[in-house]
């Protein structure tokens, strides 16, 4: 019995043998079943533009025959805008050189793990 376990640990069986197939099957079962049974606490990382000159653009479908996009701009690029109107003007100032004339439907802040606003997502119609 000890020899059998040792051979499994050190992967000593020949390819195509019964024990080799058992090891491969066990690995595949672990790979495909464990994410459903074990909470690895993994989440996608919020993607924020790395450089001040970057604006991330994602497609968000269509609305009334117009294309809708989500633009993500860094909070540092907003120029210290504190009111709602100032934020919309700052977002438009950053987006319009990229996309031309647009209208903002809504925007919301993107926060990091500490709750600090690091960017703004703006839903825009073109």
Image (spheres, rainbow, N blue to C red):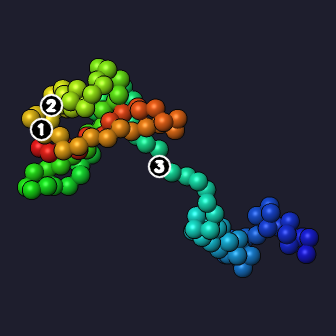
User: Mark 1 Cα within 10 Å, few/some/many (few <14, many 20+)?
Assistant: few
Res. 60 visible in picture: yes
Badge 2 vs badge 1, beta-carbon distance below 8 Å = yes
Q: Quadrant of residue 102?
A: top left
User: Mark 2 Cα within 10 Å, few/some/many (few <14, many 20+)?
Assistant: few
The answer for how far apart the CA atoms under marks 2 and 1 are is 7 Å
- The residue identified by callout 3 is 44
28 or 74, which lies in front?
74
Q: What element carries label 2?
A: helix
- The residue identified by callout 1 is 102
Judged from this view, the residue extending furthest toward the right is 2
The mark nearer the N terminus, 2 or 1, is 2
Image height of 9 relative to 94, above or below: below
The mark nearer the N terminus, 3 or 1, is 3
The residue sitting at 41% across, 32% down in the picture is 117
Percent coordinates x, y for residue 107 in the rendering: 27, 40
Q: In which quarter of the image is the N terminus?
A: bottom right
Judged left or right of residue 69, residue 101 is left
The residue sitting at 60% across, 70% down in the picture is 33
- The residue identified by callout 2 is 96
The answer for how far apart the CA atoms under marks 3 and 2 are is 29 Å
Q: In which quarter of the image is residue 87?
A: top left
The residue sitting at 57% across, 68% down in the picture is 36
Judged left or right of residue 31, residue 12 is right
Q: In which quarter of the image is residue 25?
A: bottom right
Q: Quadrant of the C terminus?
A: top left
The answer for how far apart the CA atoms under marks 3 and 1 are is 29 Å
């Amino acid at each position: 019995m000890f020899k059998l376990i040792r051979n499994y640990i050190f992967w000593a069986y020949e390819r195509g043998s019964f024990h080799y197939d058992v090891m491969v099957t066990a690995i595949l079962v672990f790979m495909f079943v464990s994410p459903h049974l074990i909470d690895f606490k993994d989440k996608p990382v919020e993607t924020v533009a790395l450089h001040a000159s970057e604006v991330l653009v994602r497609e968000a479908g269509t609305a009334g025959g117009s294309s809708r996009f989500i633009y993500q701009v860094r909070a540092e690029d907003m120029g210290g805008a504190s009111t709602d109107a100032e934020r919309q003007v700052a977002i438009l100032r950053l987006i319009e050189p990229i996309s031309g004339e647009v209208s903002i439907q809504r925007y919301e802040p993107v926060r990091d793990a500490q709750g600090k606003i690091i960017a703004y997502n703006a839903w825009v119609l073109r």
